Image (cartoon, grey):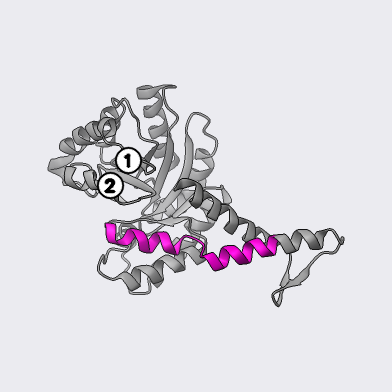
Amino acid sequence: MYVPGNDTKKIQKVPTLALDSVILDCEDGVAINKKTDARTNILAVLDSVDFGRTERCVRVNSVQSELADEDLRMICEARQLPATILLPKVECVDHLAWLRSRLQQLCGSRHRFNIIIYMESAESLLNIREVCHAGRQFTDCTLEGVVFGSDDYCANVGAVRSADSSEVLFARQYLLTVAKAYNLQAIDMVYIDIKDVEGLRAQSLEGMRMGYTGKQVIHPAQVPVVQQAFSPSPEKIRWATNLIEAFNQHQQSGKGAFTFEGNMIDRPLLLQAQNIVTAAESLRDSK
């Protein structure tokens, strides 16, 4: 969940929300005249607030804004560095390379950062494959994922937002395809109507079915809806566990595909079942 870096009250509530990760924001969630306050407060928070199992992340400003350098300087003064740095509006390999270089200059080998980047424009979409390829070659930090910034993308291409988000379908699917090709997490677009729970649930389930790893959240009320959508149900876990067991037993016969609960099963469906079980185990271990 995104929390403005200058909003101490909201940050103090984070440990009570059972979040997967908190993103202390220096970028869009912070007014331009509050950027310094956000940096200063994030530095203090990193060294003083215990977020428990919640992963601590910081979203800096974009390279183009010329504010990112000061964000990183302040963050790297912390004794307890964040696990992940999020870099918005990445449009070319040079932006990612700049971030890597500055982290090395400021922190050296003191900490290995995870990096998550945002695709938020037509240029970014065209170059996302080259950016992901470059990032996967890094050995001193880890490119973990790509976020779809749908609102900035729509503004950039002149798209009109609709209830079904059909205007971003190509970009949404292309980002997902590239991210998964490079074994990266794909984080789906934000749902800005915080009162529309059913709309959020529907879009979250749609993203999950597409193959997205997770979804951006901007309000505490959205957290349980998104977590439920991206968590395998008990019925799905039971199905996957039974399928794997049946498959292993069938393999001993030396045969290939077989029928399970009325469906023809082969290796692609087995992999799906294995992914479900792995996800369930990861969720259980994180609690």
Magenta range: 220-244
What amino acid is labelled 1 in the image? Phe
Query: What percent of the width, then of the height, locates residue 197?
Result: 31, 70
**Which SS class for mark 2?**
helix
Q: Tell me what residue is drawn at x 50 percent, y 46 percent.
A: 285
Residue 232 lies, with reference to residue 25, above or below; the image says: below
Name the residue beneath numbered marker 2.
14
Query: What percent of the width, then of the height, locates residue 52?
Result: 35, 40
Front residue (pair 131, 208): 208
- Residue 269 visible (yes or no): no
Query: Does the magenta segment cover residue 236?
Result: yes
Front residue (pair 30, 125): 30
Secondary structure mostly seen in the magenta stretch: helix
What amino acid is labelled 2 in the image? Val
Q: Tell me what residue is drawn at x 70 percent, y 78 percent.
A: 262
Name the residue beneath numbered marker 1.
51
Q: Tell me what residue is drawn at x 37 percent, y 46 percent.
A: 21
Return the disc, 2 or 1, that comes first in the chain's sequence.
2
